[in-house]
Image (cartoon, rainbow, N blue to C red):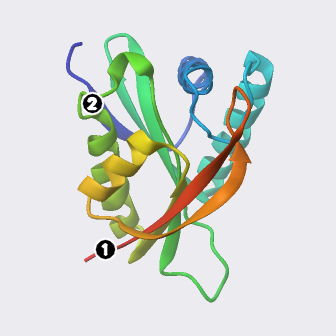
Amino acid sequence: MSRYAISQVSHLDKTQLQGLVDVLIDCVAGGASVSFMHPLSRAKAMAFWRRVADDVASGARALLVAEDDRGILGTVQLVLDQPENQPHRADLSKMLVHRRARRLGVGAALMRAAEDAARAAGKTLLVLDTASDDAERLYARAGWTLVGVIPDYALLPHGGLCATSVYYRKLA
């Protein structure tokens, strides 16, 4: 794989939307429990990314993407719009890395970039939940603290229940 770059995007063009659709469909097909069932249609995936694009444009959400010469290979979101008694917090959401780029440091780089973006937005606490064993290793290595595990939380994309693990990270 060639080198990749990570950036925070404030507007999604058609090519970026298509790339994000491809990553989401690949992750769901590969078994990632990220709110969608397999098979995920391009139309449903595109509708999701268009809603995300609206939130990004309004400032309610930050979107980071990892791209190489073949296009988008990973992404992560920060939900910045929180209740008025939680202005210091953001939710890390939809950490997605295409299977072609797994175990190459893309997820860790996206995590660092998301934490930097959260700091820049004035956030001091991040929270997330995950159902993926692979992602749990990533979060633990990145210094996140496990709060607990909720059994039978969601369906896996190909069927069957899975637990979710809840994490937090205090930012300095």
Residue 123 visible from this viewpoint: no
**Which residue is pictured at 28% across the width and 44% down the height?**
108
Which mark identifies residue 5? Answer: 2
Q: Secondary structure at mark 2?
A: strand
Query: Which quarter of the figure has residue 144?
Result: bottom left
Quadrant into which the N terminus falls: top left
Up-down: is 54 above or below 65? below
User: Which label was assigned to residue 74?
Assistant: none
- Label 1–label 2 contact, CB within 8 A: no
**Where does the image place residue 93, in percent across and percent down from the top left?**
54, 52
Q: Is 101 left or right of 10, judged from the image as shown?
A: left
* Amino acid type at image mark 2: Ala
Q: How many marks?
A: 2
Q: Is residue 167 left or right of residue 142?
A: right
Q: Camera-side residue: 88 or 105?
A: 105
Q: In this rendering, is residue 96 above or below 171?
A: above
Question: Label 1 belongs to which residue?
Answer: 171
Please tell me which residue is depicted at 67% across the width and 79% down the height of the picture: 83
Q: Name the one closer to the observer, 101 or 147.
A: 147
At x 74%, y 30%, the residue is: 37
Three-letter residue code for mark 1: Leu
Is tag 1's residue or tag 2's residue first in the polypeptide sequence?
Answer: 2
